[in-house]
Structures are given as C-alpha cells and as structure tokens.
C-alpha cells in the first residue's frame, strides 16, 4: 500500500468527519469517539446524501437525508436497509491520518 497523509487526527472532531476530494469524487473520513478512523464514499447509495454530514454513533454513520445507517468498517447498510458504500483503508500514525493512495486512485467514478 502507498499511504497519503491527509491531516492531523485532531483536525477531525470526535464523532465527526472531514471530506477528501479526489478526481473520482469525495471520500468522507470519520473519527469515532474512541479515536478510530474510517474512510467511505461520501455518497449514500439511496438518495446520494453526503455521509460526511451524517450522525456518527459507535462505528456507524446515519445518512442525513433518510437515516440509512452504514457500518463504517464494512460499508454495509444495517437493519432493513439494503445497500453498500465503498470503504478505503485508513490508519493513524504519529497523530496523522493516512489513507491508502492506491485504493483512492483506483476507485470508480462517483
């Protein structure tokens, strides 16, 4: 994997997100209350809602438009909802958030 530094962990609020823009669309990078990071497509497959504006609870995020809930580690919709968002490897190193640049550049157009 080829990792790219996207910023400091402290720049992402706990239970919040920041958006990384790529040529193929936006990726939402989430920070959980327990300081884990997850990266997902920033587009709900249901109605295209910006997941980066959703409510983070545990390791899940709820779409702000229609409350579909996605597991941030797998990208799978939870409950009765059916859908999936792409996930991207993310890690924290020395207080910095890193994303897998190879996976980001290989993603499909949004």
Image (cartoon, helix red, strand yellow):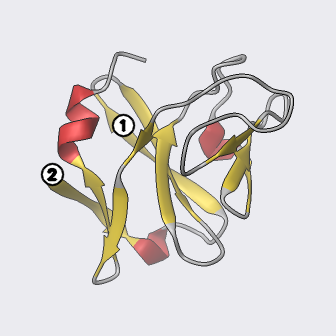
Among the 4 quarters of the image, the one containing residue 44: top right
SS type, badge 2: loop
Work out whether 6 lies above or below 110.
below
The residue indicated by pointer 2 is 1
Sequence-first disc among 1 and 2 = 2
Percent position of residue 66, x then y = 84, 28
Question: Which mark, by number, is residue 77?
Answer: none
Does residue 83 sit above or below 72 in this rendering?
above
Classify mark 2: residues with Cα within 10 Å, few (<14), some (14-19) or many (20+): few
As measured in the structure, the alpha-carbon distance from the residue carrying label 1 to the one carrying label 2 is 20 Å
Quarter the C terminus occupies: top left
The answer to whether residue 79 is left or right of residue 6 is: right
Q: How many marks?
A: 2
In the rendered image, the residue lying farthest to the left is: 2
> Relative to residue 86, is residue 5 depicted above or below?
below
Observer-side mark, 1 or 2, equals 2
Q: Does 94 sit left or right of 16 as displayed?
A: left
The residue to which callout 1 is attached is: 21
- Residue visible at 30% across and 54% down in the picture: 99
33 relative to 30 in the view: left or right: right
Callout 1 crowding tier (Cα within 10 Å): few <14, some 14–19, many ≥20: few
Give yes or no for contact between labels 1 and 2 (Cβ–Cβ under 8 Å): no
**Residue under the point 80% across and 29% down:** 65
How far across and how far down the image is residue 48, in percent? Answer: 64, 20
Q: Nearer the viewer, residue 29 or 19?
A: 29
Picture coordinates of residue 64, whole percent (x, y):
78, 37
Residue at 27% x, 25% y: name it.
23
Residue 63: image location, x then y, percent: 74, 36
**The one of 86 and 13 positioned closer to us in this rendering:** 86
| Label 1: element kind | strand
């Amino acid at each position: 994997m080829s990792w790219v530094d996207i910023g400091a962990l402290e720049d992402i609020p706990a239970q919040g997100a920041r958006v990384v823009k790529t040529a193929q669309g936006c990726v939402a990078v989430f920070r959980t209350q327990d300081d884990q990071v997850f990266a997902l497509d920033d587009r709900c497959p249901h109605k295209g809602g910006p997941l980066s504006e959703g409510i983070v609870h545990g390791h899940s995020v709820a779409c702000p438009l229609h409350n579909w809930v996605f597991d941030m580690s797998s990208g799978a919709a939870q409950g009765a909802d059916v859908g999936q968002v792409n996930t991207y490897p993310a890690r924290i190193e020395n207080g910095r958030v890193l994303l897998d640049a190879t996976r980001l550049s290989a993603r499909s157009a949004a």
